[in-house]
Amino acid sequence: MLDRQYLVISLFYAVAGLLMGIYMAAAKNHSLLVVHAHMMLLGFVVSFIYAVIYKTWLPRTSGSLAITQFCLHQVSALVMISGLFMLYAQIMPEPIVGPVLGVSSIGVLLGMLLMVVMVLKEKSVRAADYIVS
């Protein structure tokens, strides 16, 4: 179930990121390039990769760890992208938004570490099976 949720959210990020890219190109104003890059990579690409991991290697994974990982990544990514927008659109100054960006970055990292834990715990996915000897 989380695979589909990640997939749908990743596609929304892709559409939003592409629209932002088209706007920047049309306006010849690339001041939001950092926001666009984070939206496409963190929102679209990472969420899509998580969807593939859940579908392919973690189809039976559910429960509190999976829900925590999903919520942590989605909330942290949204806060980070929103904070970057406020910073680069000059809506909020760096001293105010900087700490929020720091916390959201740690949240994204923790979400990634939880994914690593779930993948390594899955019996069908063992790191030793993928090491070339």
Image (tube, rainbow, N blue to C red):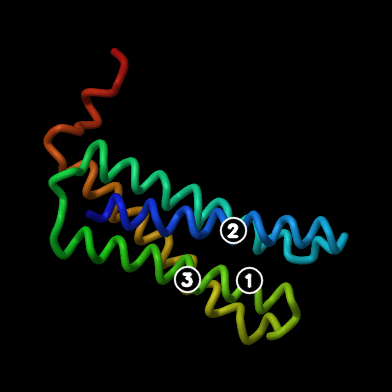
Vertical order, 87 against 13 (above or below): below
Residue at 49% over, 59% down:
12
Task: Decide which of 123, 10 is in the foreground and name it.
Answer: 10
Task: Decide which of 93, 23 is in the foreground and name it.
Answer: 23
Question: Counting residues from the N terminus, which is met first, the one under dot 2 or under dot 3?
Answer: 2
- What amino acid does circle 1 point to? Leu
In the image, residue 46 lies at what x, y percent?
45, 50
Is there CB contact under 8 Å for labels 2 and 3?
Answer: no
Task: Decide which of 103, 30 is in the foreground and name it.
Answer: 30
Q: Nearer the viewer, mark 1 or mark 3?
A: 1
**The label number, if any, that marks residue 38 in the structure image:** 2
Question: Counting residues from the N terminus, which is met first, the one under dot 1 or under dot 3?
Answer: 1
Is there CB contact under 8 Å for labels 2 and 1?
Answer: yes
**The label number, if any, that marks residue 26 in the structure image:** none
In the image, residue 123 lies at what x, y percent?
12, 36
Q: Is residue 72 left or right of residue 36?
A: left
Q: Which residue is mark 3?
A: 104
Q: Which residue is mark 1?
A: 84
* Label 3 SS: helix
User: Callout 1 environment at 10 Å: few (<14), some (14 to 19), or many (20+)?
Assistant: many
